[in-house]
């Protein structure tokens, strides 16, 4: 579950650049999702929004069912940032009955889009630019943003504040999701990470050390090649959850590569992504209920 090397697998698979893959995806995997997004458009409403934080104005996308008040979800994107794929994923989650805010974590530096369309991580300039953006994020910015984004959600009429908040992260934002749960233990009841990088580190403030400070249930979906590189991380996570008495599902998804969940990923694995999505819905259904 590392943060650097696995991004190479996300950026290139089978000799395809992200641009080449993006063109192919329009006719294959992503096209298969169009009917469900069309249905969601009839049952949800979404808009670009600005969220005021202590560090500035954060651009984000907020989508929710057309009627009623629902559990809130804070979605953090991967290193490629806020983009159509994540807006589509947020819309799909809203269609399942949640009020979802997907954010641009790099708003302090740049508004979305923060990466070129179908950006190729193998390109040195692209890689350096994305890593520079990622390096602007710290545990302190995660806590600041968690508070600001959850306050925004709680102020929306489409959010049921009697229900717990869910949060989810991908790749570099897996740790941010856990930090969100630690910063707002009073509100966050569910955390999901998908091919999260850096969940277990030697640092004193490693995300796994924050688990006792949270009051959440967890889904940790691990890429197979991440597990090959860091086989001990899943054990450390399981032990950490057990010691803290936190309900957690920690699973290595067979045959997957780092980055397999976002629908525009060059290593997108439809079947395993759908399995992870189904487990996410189970987690949120159970863990966002009122305490």
Image: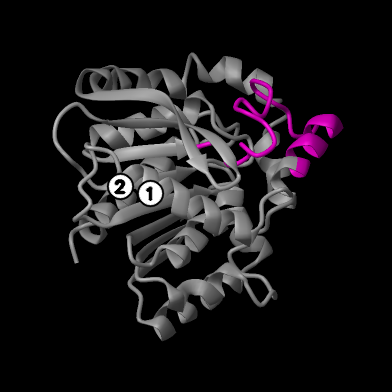
Q: Which quarter of the rendering shows the N terminus?
A: bottom right
Q: Is residue 265 above or below residue 105?
A: above
Residue 62 in the image: state x and y as whole percent: 37, 32
- Name the residue that disc number 1 marks: 151
Q: Report the magenta stretch's main SS.
A: loop
- Badge 1 marks a residue whose secondary structure is helix
Q: Can you tell which mark lies on residue 154? A: 2
- Left or right of residue 196: residue 116: right
Q: Is residue 126 above or below residue 206?
A: above
Residue at 44 percent of width and 43 percent of height: 75
View extreme (front): residue: 54
Q: Please say whether residue 127 is visible from this viewpoint.
A: yes
- Left or right of residue 122: residue 144: left
View extreme (left): residue: 68
Magenta extent: 103-132
View extreme (right): residue: 124
Q: Which quarter of the rendering shows the C terminus?
A: bottom left
Camera-nearest residue between 247 and 145: 145
Residue 224 in the image: state x and y as whole percent: 56, 55
Per the image, is 114 magenta?
yes
Dots 2, 1 in contact, CB < 8 A: yes
Camera-nearest residue between 161 and 71: 161
Label 2 crowd (10 A; few <14 / some 14-19 / many >=20): some
Per the image, is 51 magenta?
no
Q: CA distance from mark 2 to mark 1?
A: 5 Å
Residue 177 in the image: state x and y as whole percent: 48, 56
- Left or right of residue 234: residue 166: left
Residue at 37 percent of width and 21 percent of height: 32
Residue at 73 percent of width and 38 percent of height: 130
Image quarter for residue 216? bottom left
């Amino acid at each position: 579950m590392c943060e650097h090397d696995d991004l190479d697998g996300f950026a290139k698979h089978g000799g395809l650049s992200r641009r080449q893959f993006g063109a192919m995806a329009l006719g294959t995997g992503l096209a298969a999702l169009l009917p469900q997004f069309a249905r969601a458009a009839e049952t949800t409403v979404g808009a670009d929004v600005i969220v005021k934080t202590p560090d500035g104005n954060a651009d984000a996308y907020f989508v929710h069912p057309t009627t009623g008040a629902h559990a809130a979800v804070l979605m953090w994107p991967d290193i490629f940032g806020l983009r159509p794929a994540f807006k589509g994923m947020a819309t799909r989650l809203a269609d399942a009955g949640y009020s979802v805010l997907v954010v641009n974590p790099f708003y302090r530096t740049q508004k979305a889009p923060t990466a070129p369309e179908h950006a190729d991580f193998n390109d040195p300039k692209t890689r350096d630019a994305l890593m520079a953006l990622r390096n602007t994020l710290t545990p302190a910015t995660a806590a600041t943003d968690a508070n600001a984004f959850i306050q925004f959600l709680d102020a929306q009429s489409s959010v049921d504040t009697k229900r717990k908040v869910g949060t989810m992260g991908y790749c570099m934002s897996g740790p941010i999701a856990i930090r969100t749960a630690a910063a707002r233990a009073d509100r966050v009841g569910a955390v999901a990470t998908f091919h999260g990088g850096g969940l277990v580190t030697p640092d004193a403030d490693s995300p796994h050390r924050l688990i006792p400070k949270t009051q959440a249930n967890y889904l940790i979906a691990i890429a197979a090649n991440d597990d090959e590189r860091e086989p001990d991380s899943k054990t450390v996570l399981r032990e950490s959850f057990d010691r803290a008495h936190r309900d957690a599902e920690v699973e290595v998804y067979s045959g997957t590569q780092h980055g397999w969940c976002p629908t525009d990923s060059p290593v997108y694995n439809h079947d395993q992504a759908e399995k992870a999505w189904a487990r996410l819905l189970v987690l949120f259904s159970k863990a966002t209920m009122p305490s």
